[in-house]
Amino acid sequence: MSDAPLRPSQLAPRPTIRLGFPVKVLGEPLRSHDSRRWQNGPHLSVSLAYLRDVFEYLHRKQIRFYRLAGQLAPYLTHPALPAFHRQLDECTTELAATGDLIRAYGLRVTLHPAHYVQLNAPDAWLVRRAEEELGGAAALLDAMGLARDAVIVVHVGGVHGDAAAGRERFVTRFLALPENVRRRLALEHDDRRYSFEDALWIHRRTGIPVVLDALHLRCLNPAGRTLADALPVALTTWPPDCRPKIHFSTPRTALRAVRTSLGTRLQPPLPNQHSDFLDPFAFIDLLHLAQQLHARPFDVMLEAKAKDLALLRLREQLAHFAPELADVVG
């Protein structure tokens, strides 16, 4: 027998719920991607080198879920910067190696494009930009050889004066996308524009999986759904070969001092703003709910300002306040 240590992917079984965080690492001085301006020649190869260090950190901390930076390949589809358009071809070997490392460490990675990616935009040039951006993101994940679990999460987009028409445009544009792009996309509902019900309306016409956001459900919920009702509905929108994911955050409650040209102003929190750390008791309630519902395994992207530090602290708090759930969360 080999004396080599087992990779996490060789250890069994996987937890029912994996915790992840988005993009920026705060626990160590690591970069998530090459964020230099175009004049300085940023490149995907640099981002992938940074990413290997991030994956090593995740491996040490036993974190198995991570959201990649949306601009991993900087300026990849920028219409005025054609010199950046061939980065995927220039990094074929590095992308394959990155995919191998993701599988070796038992990681799941996802993407969340920038806010300007709006398939339902009324302007044709904005739609073309969205299609190009999504095509590039899907090609990047494909080049890593990643399974369908590596989804690209999008929003419906702007209301543009008519929310119903906006939903219709999203459906039309989604169905016109190439198959390799469509199979990567998942749809998140909003906190102010398009609700969970809107996302379900679109799912019924496209089959796109719905990412439940627990805080957004609180902020925009015209149907008055409870989390106990919304969670199983959202999970059933995901195909059998793709592990569902949801977003969890808790609202900021702290008063903040904001400096302005007129002096310091006290700013009260808004209910849709993410807190620095997470309410462990609200998350414990979610875990108990999932058990009561006998929910299928899913992953949770924790959206907190403290990023990985919030995840690690939540893990410690779960071990203290709910040790009976130790085998559920990974």
Image (cartoon, rainbow, N blue to C red):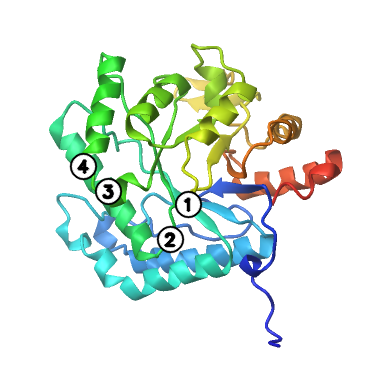
Is residue 282 shown above or below 6? above
Q: Is residue 231 left or right of residue 159?
A: right
| CB-based contact (under 8 Å), mark 2 and mark 1 | yes
How far apart marks 1 and 4 lie (CA) works out to: 24 Å
Q: Quadrant of residue 95?
A: bottom left
- Tag 1: residue type? Asp
Specify few, some or many for label 4: CA neighbours under 10 Å numbering under 14, 14-19, or 20 or more.
Answer: some
Which one is earlier in the sequence, the residue at label 1 or at label 4? 4
Residue situated in front as seen by the camera: 182 or 137: 182
| CB-based contact (under 8 Å), mark 3 and mark 4 | no
Residue that lies at the very extreme toward the front in this rendered image: 240
- Tag 3: residue type? Glu
Residue 53 location (% of width, % of height): 53, 67
| CB-based contact (under 8 Å), mark 1 and mark 4 | no
Task: Report the residue marked by disc 2.
Answer: 146
Task: Report the residue marked by disc 3.
Answer: 179
Specify few, some or many for label 3: CA neighbours under 10 Å numbering under 14, 14-19, or 20 or more.
Answer: few
How far apart marks 3 and 2 lie (CA) works out to: 16 Å
Residue 196 location (% of width, % of height): 47, 23
What label does residue 129 carry, if any? 4
- Tag 4: residue type? Arg
Mark whose residue sits in front, 4 or 2:
2
Which SS class for mark 1? loop
Q: Is residue 52 left or right of residue 256?
A: left
Which SS class for mark 2? loop
Which SS class for mark 4? helix
Residue 206 location (% of width, % of height): 33, 33
